[in-house]
Amino acid sequence: MPFEKIVPLEKPETMHRTAGVTEDVAQAIPATPSPDSADDRPSAISGDSSRLTRADTCARKKRPWLQALTSSNPGDTAKPGDDVMTTEETNDLEALRQLKSRYFRLMDTQQWEAWANCFTADVWASYEGAPRANSKLPTTVTLQGRSQLVKGVGTLLTGAKSVHQGFMPELELTSPTSARGIWAMFDYVMLPTCDFKGWGHYHEEYVKEGTDWKIKRIHLTRLHTEEKFL
């Protein structure tokens, strides 16, 4: 069988043109800047704050770690009027998180003497949708004073098991010795006569006594509760 006519291959320049990489095109493509070259594009890590967006600028003012990240000068410090947290304020916010963590842990493990140290002597607490032993009891419980709060919650949880979780805190320092916060929460309380589940928010106020933060006011609101009386 005779061989078919062999079609010659395209010339190299034709192949390049077909692929869209002719020499003329290649010269028209701007060179990739080297790591050391200047880049005029706005950047979240650029030291030139005039090129930052409004959102970038707000983020720098509210977050000291981002302020340090976006500064090209290692010695850059906040200017008067900048809303940047100090180290002490950062430590205070962490102390408030630790305080609320102890509140949950000590309550669920029923360490009432240690739990009492979470509160001021005049603490006020109101719990909406509180767990209850039977359906005739009120759903909202209000307690005034540290001793009454510890006694009331301790009595409710006698012979019970509880699991409390708090998350997504919204904390605000209102002065060097006062703060407020909102915590999303879930609790599962297994009373001898009732299984209870609830979802809601803690609305709280705090004060700093000496070097320790204390809970001064608690208002628990509910989004949903489930009760199963046994």
Image: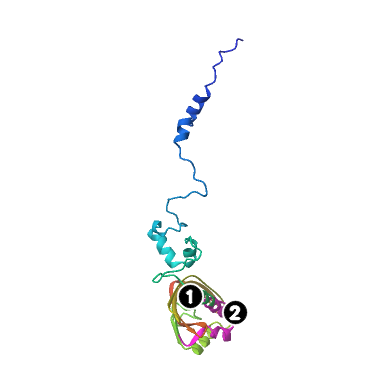
Check residue 109 in the rendering and tell me which mark sits there, or answer none: 2
Q: Is residue 13 visible?
A: yes
Displayed quadrant of residue 127: bottom left
Dot 1 alpha-carbon crowd within 10 angstroms: few under 14, some 14 to 19, many 20 or more: some
Q: Amino acid at mark 2?
A: Thr
The C terminus, quarter of image: bottom right
Q: Position of residue 17 (x, y in %)?
A: 47, 27
Q: Which residue appears farthest toward the right when viewing the image? A: 1
Q: Tell me: residue 58, above or below residue 198.
A: above
Q: Residue at x 49, y 74 (%)?
A: 93
Residue sitting farthest toward the top: 2
Q: Which type of secondary structure does the marked residue at label 1 adopt?
A: helix
Against 29, residue 183 (above or below) is: below
180 or 87: nearer the viewer: 87
Are dots 2 and 1 in contact, CB under 8 Å?
A: no
Residue of label 1: 89
Work out whether residue 134 or residue 138 is closer to the camera in this orientation and state it: 138
Residue 49 position, x and y percent, is: 41, 59
Residue located at (50% from left, 25% from top): 13
Magenta segment main secondary structure: helix
Q: Is residue 218 visible?
A: no
Image quarter where the N terminus lies is top right
Q: Secondary structure at mark 2?
A: loop
Query: What is the x, y in percent for residue 122?
Result: 46, 88
- The image shows residue 145 at horizontal and vertical percentages of 47, 89
Amino acid found under the numbered disc labelled 1: Glu
Instruction: Give the residues drawn in magenta, as a range.
Output: 99-123
Calculate the distance from the C-alpha at mark 2 to the C-alpha at mark 1.
Answer: 30 Å
Q: Which mark is residue 97?
A: none
Q: Is residue 103 rendered magenta in the image?
A: yes
